[in-house]
Amino acid sequence: MARRRAARAGGSVAPCLQLVAPDASSVSACQPAPANRLDVTLALAGTHTIIVRDFFNTVTGAYVVALDRIVPPSAAARAMQYGQSLIDDLGVSADLDLFVFNGSAGDVISASATRRTGSVSPCVELGSPTGVRTTACAAGPNNQVQATLT
């Protein structure tokens, strides 16, 4: 599964994403919002194209696009262990930070993200090896996910 996200970096642009597969089939995320996101399991190998445009097709402005692989985790993912806290930052709009850990069926876990500086509302998602996700993403300084691993 791959994640693509586009977010406004300035102005009033509402960045829409379209993913075009090698066979020319496509999927889109396009809402009149500061950010849009696609989480997609790729069905075909080969060169894929990401198209970013403004929702209204009339507004210009800066945006940031991010791409990462969720399953299997990309090489950019940082390893964690139970009981460990890591410090990181979301340096630009649409930034994604990935963390991986080894768990066992039956483990009851809690994962949280807490603001250290600025006005970010850090969202946290727990993804299983099969691609099932549990998300906590509310406005505010912290979010937490609790789950029993299966």
Image: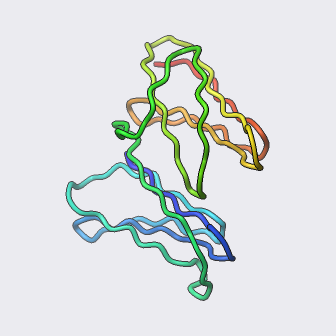
Q: Which is more toward the observer, 70 or 21?
A: 70
Q: Which is more toward the observer, 62 or 29?
A: 62
Q: Residue at x 41, y 65 (%)?
A: 27
Q: Is residue 80 above or below residue 141?
A: above
Q: Quadrant of the N terminus?
A: top left
Q: Residue at x 39, y 30 (%)?
A: 129
Q: Residue at x 47, y 35 (%)?
A: 132
Q: In the rendering, at what x and y percent does residue 21 appear?
A: 29, 64
Q: Is residue 101 above or below residue 131?
A: above
Relative to residue 122, is residue 72 drawn left or right? left
Q: Residue at x 62, y 21 (%)?
A: 110
Residue 148 occupies quadrant: top right
Q: In the rendering, at what x and y percent does residue 34 appear?
A: 65, 66
Q: In the rendering, at what x and y percent does residue 52 appear?
A: 47, 73
Q: In the rendering, at what x and y percent does residue 77 appear?
A: 43, 36
Q: Is residue 26 above or below residue 125?
A: below
Furthest toward the bottom, the residue is: 58
Instruction: Give the color scheme: rainbow, by chain, secondary structure or one colour.
Output: rainbow
Residue 134 occupies quadrant: top right
Image mark count: 0
Q: Is residue 116 above or below residue 30?
A: above
